[in-house]
Amino acid sequence: MAEIREVALPNTSDVYRPSDAIVEHSNVMAYARSRGFSSYEELYQWTLDNNEQFWADMASELEWFQPWEKVLDDSNKPFFKWFVGAKTNIVHNAIDRHAASWRKNKLAMVWEGEDGTQRTFSYHALNREVSKMANVLKSVGVKKGDIVTIYLPRIPELPMMMLACAKIGAAHSVVYGGFSEAALADRLAHSQSTVLVTADGGFMRGKIVELKKIADEAMARTPSVQTCLVVKRTGHTINMEIGRDLWLHELMGLPIAAADCPTEVMDAEDPLFILYTSGTTGKPKGVVHTHGGYMVGIYATLKMVFDIKEEDRYWCAADPGWITGHSYIVYAPLITGATSFMYEGAPNYPFPDRWWSLVSKHSISILYTAPTAIRGLMRFGEAWPSRHDLSSLRLLGSVGEPINPEAWKWFYSVIGKDRCPIMDTWWQTETGHFMITPTPVVPLKPGSATRPFLGIEADVVHEDGTPCGPNEDGLLVIKRPWPGMMRTILNDPQRYVDTYWTRLPGMYAAGDSARKDEDGYIWVIGRLDDVIKVSGYRLGTAEVESALVSHPAVAEAAAIGLPHEVKGNSIHAFVILRAGFEGSPKLEEELRAHVGHELGPIARPDAITFVSVLPKTRSGKIMRRVLKARAQGLPEGDISTLEE
Ligand code: PRX
C-alpha cells in the first residue's frame, strides 16, 4: 500500500498550542458558544450529527434571492445537490451587498506590481469596474451559460474578469498564466469558449511573459474563439487581429461599458466556473463548481480557519489561476468583506526579502502560502526576513503538498515569531474548499493538516473501505458530501463517477495516501496516482509525456516525479527516440525546451534519460513505480507483472 511516497513521513511528536488570546477571540469559538458548546471537540461532533443544520447555519450568514427548500439532495448519488431551490449569485455576496453597506469605502483589493506600482479598489470601486467589464462581456455576445476562458497574469483584471463573468451568469475557465500554448489550446477547445480574455503580457522577474503571443498560437489551433479581449499591462508591441482582437481599456471607455449592471439571478446549482486539473490519464479534466454550495463552503472555511476579522489585511500568495486563488484570493475574502492583498511577481525579485518587505509595507495580518515557497525563501537565510517588521502577522497558512517539519518550524519561528499558528490546509481542486485543516483553536503538529474541518468526515481506510488502525498507511477518503464539492467533470459525468466514487463505494476517494495517528491527526503522504506536484502545482505524467511525444524525435516517453529539496518533486523523463535520432545533451535541452513551450516552464523536466526500452506490464502500461525506484536506487518492489 502507498508504495509511491512523495515525502517521507515526519517522525515528530512536537505539539504547538495556540495562545489563550487567539482561542478566546476566534470566530470558531464564537460560533461554538452561539451553539452552546465550550469545546471544539463537542462542536465538531455536533456538526457531524447535525450536518445539514451546520451548513444551513453557515448559509444563513449570506444573502439569497430566494431561500432553499432542501439543504442536501442525495437522491442521485454521487451527483449531490446543495441548497436546492435557492436563488443567489456569488457576486451578490462578494461585492453587491458590501457596496450597498458601510463597507462600500473599505478596501476590497490592494495590489502591488513587481515594479512597485500600486492599485487599490474599494468595494464601491470594485463594483464599478466589475459592472463595466460585465457590460463589455455582454457587448461581445457573452450570455448566461457560456464559458469564457481567461488567460491573464496576476493583475487586478484577473479577479475582476472572473467576477464579471459570474455576475452575468457566464462560467469562467481560467488558465494559469504560467501555462503555454498546448495547455491553453486544449482547454479552449474542450470548453468550446468563443471568448478569450488575455493581456499583451505579464511581468515576471523583470521580464515580459508574452501572453498574447502564446494566446495567438493557441487560437490558431482552436477556431472556436471569435473574440479576444486584451488587457494592456506591458505596453509592448503585439499582434492585434482585426475583427477578433479588441483592447479591453478601449471598450471600457465606451458607453457600452456602463457602470451599473444587474447581477444575474442564478440557481444555487448553476455552474460558476470550470477549472481544469490534471488527472491520471489523458487530458486534464474540467472540474465544475457551482454558485450556491461553493459560496457557503469557502465562506465558512475562510471565516473559521483564517479567522477573518474586519481589520485584517489578508494575503493569499497563490495565483488566482489555481483553485487556491479562485477560492481564497478571489471569492472567499470578498464574501467575508475582507481586504485582500495580491502581488504580481516572484517572491525573490528583485531581492529575497521582497515578500517580507510587502508584509511590513502593507501590514499583512494573515499570510497563506505553500511549502515550496517557504523552502525557497528559507534557503536565503534569516537575515532577509529579520530586516523587516513582521509584527502585523497573526496567522500563517500552508497548502499544496505536505509541509516538511523543518520548513514548518522555520515559518513558525522566523516569520511568525513563535506566536502565529500555521493553518496547514489539505484540500483539492475537486473539493473546492478546505477539508482537513486546523482552526486557530487546534493544537498543531508540524507536518500534519490535523483534523477534518467542521461538518467534514474524513478517514484513512484500507482498499476494502475498512478503517486503518493508528499510523497505518491507507487511502484518504471523505465519507459524506460537503457543499463545495465538485458537481461533475465537464462533458464527462461518467469519469467523475469512475475517478472518485467507484474505488470505495459510498466514499469520495481523494487519490492521496495518508495516515491517522493515535490522536486522530491526519498525515497526508502524497498522491497515489500519476499526478506529480511540482512546486505545489499539479501536473499529470500523461500531459508531460504527450508534450514529449509531440516532438518529432520522440517515439515514447515516461515521466516521473523525484524528490526535490525546494520544489517538493521534480520531473524526470525517460525517452525512447525514433529511428535515426541519437540522444545527446543538445537534444536533451531541446526536449526540455519543447515541453516548456508546449505546457509551460513548470512542466519542464529537470532531466531526461534516453533509453531503449521502458518497463511495462504485460498489458502495456508503463510501470512508473519501477522507473522511480531505479532512479532513486531503491528496491523495485513487486515486479511480477513486468513484461518479459
Ligand atoms: O496531494 C494533495 C496535495 O495537493 C493535491 C490537490 O492538488 P490541487 O487540486 O492542485 O489543489 C491544491 C490546492 C488546494 C492533494 O490531493 N495537497 C494539497 N494540500 C495539501 C496537500 N498535501 C498535503 N498537505 C496539504 N496541506
Image (tube, helix red, strand yellow):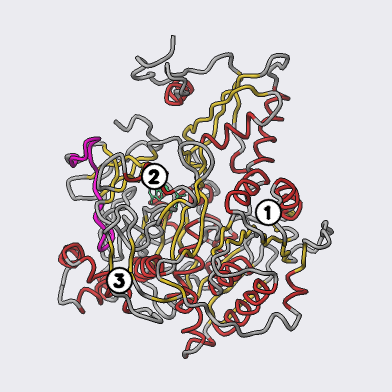
- Mark 2 vs 1, N-terminal side: 1
Give how far across and how far down residue 611 sits, in percent.
58, 16
- The C terminus lies in quadrant: top left
Farthest front residue in view? 76
Which residue lies under the disc numbered 2?
Answer: 404
Residue 504 placement, left or right of 346: left
Q: Residue 30 appears in which quarter of the rendering?
A: bottom left
The nearer-to-camera label among 2 and 1 is: 1
The nearer-to-camera label among 3 and 1 is: 1
Q: Is residue 395 above or below residue 10?
A: below
Q: Is residue 457 magenta?
A: yes
Q: Residue 394 appears in which quarter of the rendering?
A: bottom left
Give how far across and how far down residue 474 sits, in percent.
26, 38
Residue type for callout 2: Asn
What secondary structure is found at the residue carrying circle 3?
helix
Residue type for callout 1: Ser
